[in-house]
Amino acid sequence: MSSLSPVTLKLSGKVIPNRIYRTALSEYSGSYDENDVTNTGKPLPRYIELHQELANGGAGLICFGNIPVHRDHLENFNNVVLDRDQPWDAVESFRPAILAAKSRGALCLPQLNFTGRQCPEFLNPNPVSSSDVKLHYCMDKSYGQPTPLSKAQIRDIIDRFVWAAETVVKAGADGIILHAAHGYLINQFLSPHINKRIDEYGGSIENRARFVVEIVESIKARLPTDRYIIGAKINCQDFVCGGATFAEQCVVIKLLEAAGVDFFDISGGTYEAPAWRGNLESLGETQPPAGEGTFLKWARDIKKILSRAVVGTTSGWRDSELMMAAVRRGDIDMCGLGRPLRDDPDLPNRVFTGERIQSKL
Ligand SMILES: Cc1cc2nc3c(=O)[nH]c(=O)nc-3n(C[C@H](O)[C@H](O)[C@H](O)COP(=O)(O)O)c2cc1C
């Protein structure tokens, strides 16, 4: 098996032409108008250029950086946004970037997100979350006191995910990838450290997983999984005391595969412990060899318990020989790259021609 071996997503039958994907990494290329929220989140020309560069560079799957599904709950002021209340035509606004991403044969999965308590206070001092557990100052920002979501609000957010998924598919995407990692709202439901609910969305791991499973089921009802991909970027564990453990995340990942998720991008950490930056040692864990994927050992065990879904993992890949060795061994199906492709979108093409890349990032 080589870096250029295609991989088939079993439910949709869609084929990823090679083993390198661009993980979701916010492009920060949306319009922002602090006086008029209706002008927020529209893709700017750089959004198209950037995805054309990624397409030209050869990655087999291009995940767009997180796209908030609510204009009042951004990750940063210049996010692109998919909010059904925006007056502009979302299909036409996103189509050029999606077509650019797909122009050289890659598949395209925009990442849908709801920030929850990780919405910076300067953007919204009144966030919502699974419960009322406030996030302390971290990632150079402060955060407001969150209000627990009512069941009607949970349903509204699920409907927003569905609307956003249908919108990007109308604009040409192959499906979507959910941001179920890094401490955002889906993760806030999964985490026992944050989710203190006593209704059917809290308590047991099956209850904490209910929100994300309902999102998947609701998207699937509109976008059948034999035609469209539902992916999930998800933590192997939170690396936070009292947060979601590896054992619990395995249960969630199995539930999601059964519900129709066909691709997992394995990551780890939250704003409280941003393990995706690759600093495992500082979190009391063993650091993997330089240049190897931060979460490889967990992704390998996750692949073993799954029956169908394609498994990739992102963070820390800096040596293309270690990347392809992990794929050849069958530890994982694919390698995800974030910052290395921001630095050099052409990296996959160079790997495919046999060059060994040892990025110093
Ligand atoms: C500037 C920046 C923006 C990011 N935006 C996102 C995002 O929108 N969605 C996401 O899942 N991860 C995001 N991440 C995390 C990356 O996708 C990735 O998991 C992390 O950078 C580790 O991978 P790398 O070592 O290949 O860069 C972001 C990281 C950075 C540095």
Image: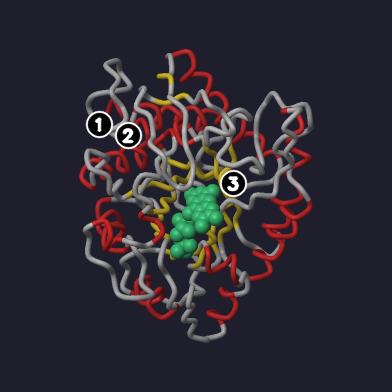
Q: Up-down: is 308 above or below 5? A: above
Q: For the residue marked with disc 3, what is the amino acid?
A: Pro
**Callout 1, which amino acid?**
Ile
Residue indicated by mark 1: 205
- Residue shown at 35% from the left, 48% from the top: 235
Q: Tags 1 and 2 in contact by the CB under 8 Å rule? A: yes
Q: Label 3 belongs to which residue?
A: 110
Q: Earlier in the sequence, mark 3 or mark 1?
A: 3
Task: Count the labels in the image.
Answer: 3
| Whether residue 347 is situated above or below residue 51 in the rendered picture | below
> How far apart are labels 3 and 1 at the CA level?
27 Å
Q: Alpha-carbon neighbours of circle 3 within 10 Å: few (<14), some, or many (≥20)?
A: many
Calculate the distance from the C-alpha at mark 1 to the C-alpha at mark 2: 7 Å
Q: Nearer the viewer, residue 226 or 232?
A: 232
Regarding residue 75, the answer to whether it shows in the image is yes
Crowd tier of the residue under label 1, counting other residues whose Cα lies within 10 Å: few below 14, some 14–19, many 20 or above: some
Left or right: 248 as drawn, with respect to 356: left
* Residue marked by disc 2: 190
| Marks 1, 2: nearer the viewer | 2
Expressed as whole percent of the image width and height from the top left, the position of residue 327 reads 38, 70
Q: Which quarter of the picture shows residue 59?
A: bottom right
* Ligand 1 has an atom within 8 Å of the beta carbon of the residue at disc 2: no
